[in-house]
Amino acid sequence: MTIQTVATTPFAGQRPGTSGLRKKVTEFQQPGYLENFVEAIFLTLGEGAERSLVVGGDGRYFNRQAVQTILRMAAAHGIERVLVGRGGILSTPAVSCVIRKHAAFGGIVLSASHNPGGPDGDFGIKYNIENGGPAPEKITEAIFANTQTLTAYRISDAPPVDLDVLGTTRIENMVVEVIDPVADYAGLMARLFDFDAIRALFARGFSMRFDAMHAVSGPYAHAILEGMLGAPSGTVINGVPREDFGGGHPDPNPVNAAELIALMNGPGAPDFGAASDGDGDRNMIVGRRLAVTPSDSLAIIAANATVAPGYKHGISGIARSMPTSTAADRVADALGISCFETPTGWKYFGNLMDANLVTLCGEESYGTGSHHIREKDGLWAVLFWLNLLAASGKGVEQIVREHWARFGRNYYSRHDYEAVDAGAADQMMQALREQLPELAGRRLDGHHVAEADDFVYNDPVDGSVATRQGIRIIMSDGSRIVFRLSGTGTEGATIRLYLERYEPDPARHDLDTQEALRRLAEIADDISGLRRRTGRESPTVIT
Ligand code: G1P
Ligand code: ZN
């Protein structure tokens, strides 16, 4: 075994997006592409980062190969010890959990989250820091800068490690420890939630379906729901991770988890439905004939946090990404705590949680989580709901309706226009920016624009500033139209249009969501020229 120095040249476009570097598998398969990015990570970490590192991914195509490359490169950079999940598997929340539990200095997560996998699908890599959370922008930018200037990478020529057997081996001087991917995470969940109450709920015949979408949550859900909590076998469906996620799109929303939605809408539906995404950090919560919007789920968890033992002393604050509905803000008001509004992406929550300013965080994109780790956490949200259902004796629909009756309902939807021409998307955003000064104060089809801006976030903890985080048009009745471009897509540009309307009157809580938001959608199209500029008649996906 020796350490090789391999000459290389920079690849264009290795700037991490909303959540790490995501590209087509074929792009990652180019010789040196992954190696360059990993070298840039190690260059950024520099000296003093020799302790332990966590490595794992969502099991998608290219995961195993990437793990082997990273292990050989870590050994060449003087890392003392790497903890790697068996089979190269670790869900994103489990990586965060393992980093924190074992006081590692960081971790490398291999995932393109909810993007499809397989040889023609997507792959991704991201670096997480010591607190277990995604690296903040100053680090991702430094990694990017290094990708542009490096001339060589270092790698051991050791043979591949057997990833399927628990235990330790060595590459050069580095210890490789293959760990059970589930154990640490399951232990943490058992401390946060009332497992006895949930076990009793299942023992009473409560029925549930958890759709792991052929992705990484399968082993976690099997072990926790069916193993520790006694849910009948068959509760977890699509529970074996596949390299191509069974050809599906492992994004838990009503469009992609259609099988689960059909079940929950049909006769004899189970009491509770849930799903999670490729890397296990997203969640969808479904009752009979009712899919709970992620924004509502965050607000409901916040309003009921004290039912779970891990939160019995209450929550210190809430944070939501800017496009997420303001339902959580109303709960924060009622609880007398702060609600922070951050740019899209979990990395912006880390500082707030580290400083103890917030306990709960959420995004409209089916992401919910708490300060137990520094990633969003799909199964955590599902377990919270189970704990709430067990403690309250109520069903999903009753809980949601009572919440709306107390706080009002925020009708909410996101319209995605995927793979549109990048130039047209940029022009649309630019034209919107230019209109901002004259939009404020205007009347638009019966709505009065109270505020219009391009969202700027001032991090209250480290003082960093993130600009151009999305166009907000806020009406005086609290309705909002938000436009932003996706930072995770791998084809052309994806325009996200977020629509929100607040309805305090319980007599009007039964409208169809798209109907309730129709006028706002029309206003959005009028001011942006979205359809005209993109040549699209309707969104690719509505959630
Ligand atoms: C999307 C979501 C965002 C989430 C990210 C990673 O990013 O909108 O909330 O944090 O995936 O899961 P986007 O493609 O919008 O940049
Ligand atoms: Zn994900």
Image (cartoon, rainbow, N blue to C red):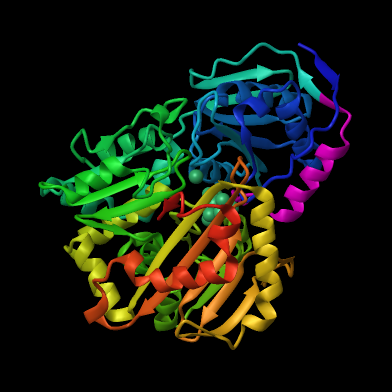
Residue 85 vs residue 299: left or right? right
| Residue at figure coordinates x 57%, y 55% from the top left | 495
- Judge by depth and name the residue closer to the eye, 138 or 445: 445
Query: Residue 124's quadrant in the figure?
Result: top right
- Judge by depth and name the residue closer to the eye, 100 or 68: 68
| Residue at figure coordinates x 46%, y 30% from the top left | 180
**On the rendered image, what quadrant is the C terminus found in?**
bottom left
* Residue bounds of the magenta highlight: 131-153
Decide: is 317 above or below 11: below
Residue 421 vs residue 314: left or right? right
| Residue at figure coordinates x 58%, y 43% from the top left | 99
Residue 91 vs residue 236: left or right? right
Question: Is any part of residue 351 visible from this angle?
Answer: yes
Q: Position of residue 443 (x, y in %)?
A: 53, 86
Q: Position of residue 76 (x, y in %)?
A: 78, 24
Q: Is residue 141 magenta?
A: yes
- Judge by depth and name the residue closer to the eye, 167 or 491: 491
Decide: is 106 above or below 243: below
